[in-house]
Amino acid sequence: MQYPEQFDVIVIGGGHAGTEAAAASARMGAKTLLLTQSIETLGQMSCNPAIGGIGKSHLVAEIDALDGVMAKATDQAGIHFRVLNSSKGPAVRATRAQADRTLYKNAVRDILEHQENLQIFQQSVVDLVVENDTVVGCETQMGLTFCAKTVVLTTGTFLGGKIHIGDQQQSGGRAGDPPSIALAERLRALPFRVGRLKTGTPPRIDGRSVDFSVLESQLGDDPRPVMSSMGKRSDHPQQISCHITYTNADTHQIITDNLDRSAMYSGAIEGVGPRYCPSIEDKVVRFADKSSHQIFIEPEGLNTTELYPNGISTSLPFDVQLQFVRSMQGFANAHISRPGYAIEYDYFDPRDLQHSLETKAIAGLFFAGQINGTTGYEEAGAQGLLAGINAARKCQDKTPWEPRRDEAYIGVLVDDLINLGTTEPYRMFTSRAEFRLRLREDNADQRLTPMGIDFGLVGHERRSYFEEKLRRVDEFRKQFKATCILPSSDLDQKLALNLRKETTLEEALRRPEINSQKISVALALTETDSNGDAHIDALAVKQLEIETKYAGYIKRQDEEILKIRRHEGMLLPATMDFAQLEGLSNELKQKLEHHKPDSLARAARIPGMTPAALSILLIHAKALAKNAAKASTL
Amino acid sequence: MEANQALNNDLICAIATPPGQGGVGIVRLSGKGAGEVAAQLCAKPLQSRTAVYTDFFDAQELLDNGLALWFPGPNSFTGEDVVELQGHGGPVIQHRILNALCQRGARLARPGEFSERAFMNGKLDLAQAEAVADLIASSSIAASKAALNTLKGAFSEMISAIALDIANMRVRVEAAIDFPEEDIEILQEAKVAEDIARTVTALEAILEQANQGRLINSGISVALIGQPNVGKSSLLNALAGEEAAIVTNIPGTTRDLLKIDLVIGGLPIRLVDTAGLRESSDEVEKIGIARAIAQAAEADLTLYVAAADTLEEGLASSELVGNIELIQESDSQPNNILLVVNKSDLGAMRNLPKDIASVSVSAKTGEGLDLLKKAIQESVGFGQENVPFAARQRHIQIIKDTLVKVNAAAQALTQNQGAEFVAEELYIAHQRLGEITGTVTPDDLLGKIFSEFCIGK
C-alpha cells in the first residue's frame, strides 16, 4: 500500500547520521519521516561508548552550534568528561566524554520524539522508488510505499554487512542486528561506485571478573567540561572512572602463535581497515619492537558491568580472544560477554556525491554517514546534519549549504571525501584542516550559529544565548580598549604588569603571560555561577583572549582564504577533457581524470599539482568558455 | 573595466629582453601597485602612457638611467597596471633592478606568467590560448631544469633532504597534537628543536652556496680538464684573448689551478685551467691532478679537452672514456660535461664517446671558438629566455621564505607558544618548499604518522 501522507524528507537509518539528519530537517520545518529497523536502537553507539576527542569534538561543537542532537545527548549521558590537549592551545583542545550507552540512546530518542514535524516508523527499507533519475520515495519490507521529495540514506555498515570472528563468518550489520541485504542489492544496481571497507571491535568484558585494584585508574577532569555550549554540569549523570591496562609479552606471544587463525591475516577479509585503528594482531605484527600496548578500559554505562577494552579490536577466533584477554594485568579471570569481531561492509564512493551530499546520479537522494566511507559517530552526525539541512533546503527550493574548509570541519570532511574519495574508513584529525587555528571548539558558535539562525535551524533558546554571548564579547572588547592602566595603579599591580608607562587593558592582553583568568580575577568578574558552570562573562573574556593571541595567524590565513575563494570562483567546465590538455604530465592528467575537479580550488588540492599546471587548466577553461559563448551566439 | 580574471593579480616582474649584453634591457612589472612600486625607483614621477627619461635608484644608489613607461590597466599588455623600465642591457644592472623591485613587494614572474595574464584578461585572442599553455608547460620544465643546473651541484639532493627533515618534524608535532593519549613519547621537544636547528643550518648553507648574485656577479665556473698537452691553456688564452696562462709544450706545465674571469655574450664566467690528467710521480703534480678533479666536480661546467691529432683510429680511446667517467663519478651533476676536441687544424673529430656533447675547435686558428662559446652558454641554460636567472632567483626566494618559517617554528617552540603554532609555521615552511619538491598532503603526513607510531585504540 501507499502511505497516505506525503513527506518532504525521508531519512532511512536511525544511527548518528540518521538522527541528526531527521532532527535537522524537521527543525527547519520540513515534514520528515525517520525509517529505522528498530526504534529501540535509535542513537545506538555500536563501537566504543565515547563521544568527542581531537578533531571529533570539533565536529560535535559544530553540530551543537547548529542546535543538533549529539552534544546535548552527550551531556545527558556522559559519565566521564575530559579535555584533551589542555596543555596546548585552544585550537587543538578537545572535549571527550564516556557515555552510558543506554542514557545516550534514551536522550537521542527523547529529543527525536519531542521534535515537531518528525515522525518515526519502524520497518526495514528494501527499495528506493526512482522516477526519471529522481527519487520519489521508498518501499519497506511489508510492501509499504512512502512518498517524499527527498530521501537521505544513512544505513551505516548495514549494507552487505559481513561479520568475521576468526574463520567464522555471518551476515550482520552490527552484532545482533540483521544487515540490509535487499537494499544493498538494490543500490548496487544504481549507478554508484561501491567499495568495501572493514572495521573491528574488541571483545567486551564483564567488569565483575576484572581485578580493578591492580589497574591504573583515570579520573575525569575537574572542573568538569560540558559538551554542548548550552550544557550544564547539572545535566550530567553520576561520574565514574576509566581504567588503563597493558598488553605484555605473553599477550603478544598468544597473538603471534595464532595469527593464521585471524580473519584478517587468513585473507578472508577483502575490505581495507583504518590505519589509525589497527587490530591488536596488526599492532603486534607491525610494531613488533613494542613490548606493550596501552589499553583503555571504558565503562559501558552506570547500570551495567560490561566494559569496553579500547585497543584490542580483533578478528581472532573466540578461544584466542579469551586467552590473550586473560594474559593482561587485572584480566586473569576475565569473562568475555561478547566476542570481538571484524565487520566488512559496502560503502559508496563519495566522489559520486555533490558537496551538498546529494548524489550526482539521482536527484533528491542524499547519502550521509558511514555509507560514504567514514568512521565515527561524530563524522556520521556531521554529515547527517548537512544532508538533513540540504534535503530540507531542496524542498524549500533553496540553494544547498556547502560549508567551506575555512568555515568548519564539516566543510573539510565533505570536501576531502568528495574531492579525493577515501581508501580507508575516513576519520577526522585536526591535521586535515589547513585552517586549524580558526576552526576551534570555542568559536564553533561564532562560525556557524548565525548561519543556523538564517536556515531556521537554531531554536530560540540557543539563539538568545548566542546573541548574549556576542554582546558580552563586544562590550568587553570596547571596555578593554578604553581601560587605561597607569603604572603602579591597582590593575597594574593585580596583573603584575610592572608598567613603566600607561597602557590599555587590550594591549596588556597581548602579553604572553596575561590570560583571561588573570583578567577575570583582576576585574572581579563572576567566573562560575552557583552550579559551577562557567559564567558567560568568563567565556566572553576567554574568547577575547583567544582572538588576541591568534590574531596574527588568523590575519595571514585570511589572505590565504581570499586567494582560495578566487580560485573557487574559477570553475572548470564539466565538458573539460583532462586527458586532452596539452602541457600537463600524464600523471597529472590521470589524477585530474580521476578526481574531475569542478573548480580551480579543488584542482589545487590534488596531490602533486603545481602552479604551472593550474595556470594551464585555467587557460583551457577560459578558452572552452569563450568557445561555448561563441557557439551560442551563432 | 573587466574584472581581472587571472589566477593572481599580485605584482610580478621579469626581464623582458633577451639575456646578455644588449643595447637596451627592459624590466617589466605587472599587477596591483605596479605604478607605485616602480615610482619608488625612479627619480622623476611616472606619467601615464608617456616615456619619461629618468635615473633609476635603489635607495640612494644609482642603478641605471633610461625610460620609464607606465601603462595603467586595463590598457596594457597584460590588462593590469604595467610599468616598463628600459635601461641599459647587461645582466648585472637588470638583476639589481629586479632585486630592488622584489624588495618593494614584487615577486619574480613564473615562466609565461605575463602572457597568461594577458590571455586571461582578454588581451590575447583565443587562438593563442594553446600557445600560452604550451609556453607555460615547456618553460616551467626548462626553468626548473635550468635552475637546478645553475644552482650548486648537490642542490636538489639538499632540498629533498630538508623537505624530508621538515616532514619528519611535522610528523612528530602533528602526532603530538592529534594523538596526545597514546603512550608514546611522540613530541620529544628536544628532538624537534635539534631537527629545527639542523634544518636552519642546512637552509643557510644552501643560501650561502647559492649566493643570490653569484651567477651574475661572479659568473658560472667552467673547469678545463684533460690529458697533458692537449692545449687546455692555449684554449683558455684563445677564449680570454690574452696570455693569461703559461703555455708550453712540455707536458704538465700547468701544475696549479689558474683562474681567469671573462664575459662571454653577457654571461660572466670564471674559467679554471687545471693540471693535465696523467699518472705522475711528481708530488706537486699529483696534488695538482687531485685538485683538477675536485675543481671539475665543483664547476658548473667541465670542458674536457682532447686533441684531434691524438684521437686514435677505430674505437674511442679507452683512456678518454675512463677519464670522463672518473670525472662524472666525482661530480654530482655528471651531465654538465662538454667534450672539446682541440687542434681541429691537425685532425678531424672521430671515435668520440657517443653520449657526451662535443665541439671541435682550434685554439690556434680560432676555428670553432664561437660554437664553443655558444655551447658554454647553452649548457647552463643561458640564452633561453632569461630562464636560468629568473628560475634560480625564484628557487632562492623559496628557500629564504622557508628559512624564515622554520626560524619562526623554532621561536614558537622555545617560547612555549603551543604545539599548534609550531605546527602552523612548519606547515607553511613545508608548503613553500613544496613549490620545488611537490606538495605533501595531510594524508601523506598521516600515513607517515601511522607507519612510524603505533597509534590507535
Image: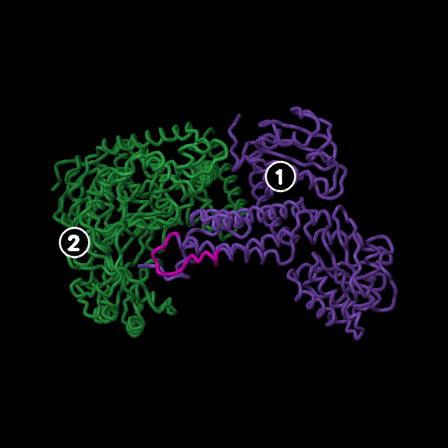
Q: Residue furthest toward the front?
A: A488
Q: Hey, what amino acid is under mark 2?
A: Leu
Q: Mark 1 — on which chain does it sit?
A: B
Same-chain check, marks 2 and 1: no
The secondary element bearing badge 2 is classed as loop
Query: Is B402 contained in the magenta span?
Result: no
Crowdedness near tag 1: few (<14), some (14–19) or many (≥20) residues, C-alpha within 10 Å: some
- Which residue bears the numbered disc 2? A302
Q: Nearer the viewer, residue B455 or A75?
A: A75
Q: Residue A584, how many percent across, how many down?
A: 52, 48
Q: Which mark is residue A581?
A: none
Q: Which chain is purple?
A: B
Please tell me in which quadrant of the rendered image residue B153 appears.
bottom right
Left or right of A523? Residue A230 is left
Q: In the image, which residues are magenta?
A: B177-192
Q: Residue B195, how many percent across, how many down?
A: 51, 57
Q: Which mark is residue B102?
A: 1
The prevailing secondary structure element of the residues shown in magenta is: loop
The quarter of the image holding the N terminus of chain A is: top left
Colour scheme: by chain
Query: Which shade is chain A?
Result: green
